[in-house]
Image: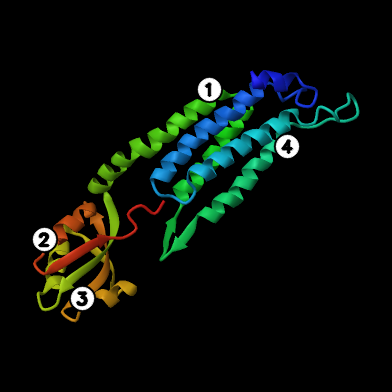
Amino acid sequence: MVIHWLADTPLFGGPGQGTRQIVELFAAFGLTSLIGLEREIQGKAAGLRTQTIVGTAAALIMLISKYGFFDVLAAGTVMVDPSRVAAQIVSGIGFLGAGIIITRRGAVHGLTTAAAVWESAAIGMAAGAGLLLLAVMVTGIHFVIILGFMPVARRLAARLSGSIRMQITYEEGRAVMKELLAICDRRRWQLTEMAAYPGLDAMEVSEQQSSAVITLAGTGVNQAPLVLAGIPGVLSIRQLEEDPD
């Protein structure tokens, strides 16, 4: 009822401020908040608030691009291209996404979250353009990609060649590294990196213990933490950067 009253008032009336546009804004708000909630649950920095603001703002900019210039248009004198303002959303989101992506120790973090921000902007643009069915479909596809593809990717990684980075803490004098190399040789895993006393964690290692970071590559290497944990003398294994996005 309030929406109808606002649409009938002189200040809030006019093209682009009717019930349909308000529904489109709320559709962008609701759909992108679902994506933001998923990112929030995953513990990502660009979560519920960021995704929802991006999507709702993109929808508003799209509506401005469609209806915001009716008061200055004049046939034969002033002509505008409604796509010009909307096109700038893509460029602006590119800068926001670049700020989310970081590189640490040679690994790229935040790609999926940056892509999700870009996706939220696209969903907001679709809602603002009145393409609500497409906006709903892409929101559903997002959850298929995030929730459905992850188990598939893990199964493929277990069967195909890949790499894994781990921190191993072990007792001195137990020939742990010798046994580790023997296991890697039997399973045809390649030891591509090894660094002793990595980072600040080494300060917590006692004189009878050692800590090292190793990177293994090969087929079925995702099983390495479970296999190496069975070596006598291994105290702990911590997989590093399991989910960089």
Q: Residue 84 carries which label?
A: 4
CB within 8 Å, label 4 to label 3: no
Instruction: Name the mark on residue 133.
Output: 1
Work out whether mark 3 precedes mark 1 in sequence or the reverse, and give the earlier one.
Answer: 1
Position of residue 201 relative to residue 63, above or below, is: below
- Amino acid under disc 4: Arg
x, y (%) of residue 133? 53, 22
* Residue labelled with disc 2: 230
Task: For marks 4 and 3, give the one nearer the viewer.
Answer: 3
Mark 1–mark 2 Cα distance, whole angstroms, equals 53 Å
> Which residue matches tag 3?
210
Asked if residue 42 can be seen in this view, the reply is yes
Q: Quick one: SS at disc 2?
A: loop
Q: What residue is at 51 percent from the left and 53 percent from the top? A: 100
* Alpha-carbon span between mark 3 and mark 1: 58 Å
Task: Tell which circle, 4 or 1, labels the residue nearer the N-terminal end.
Answer: 4
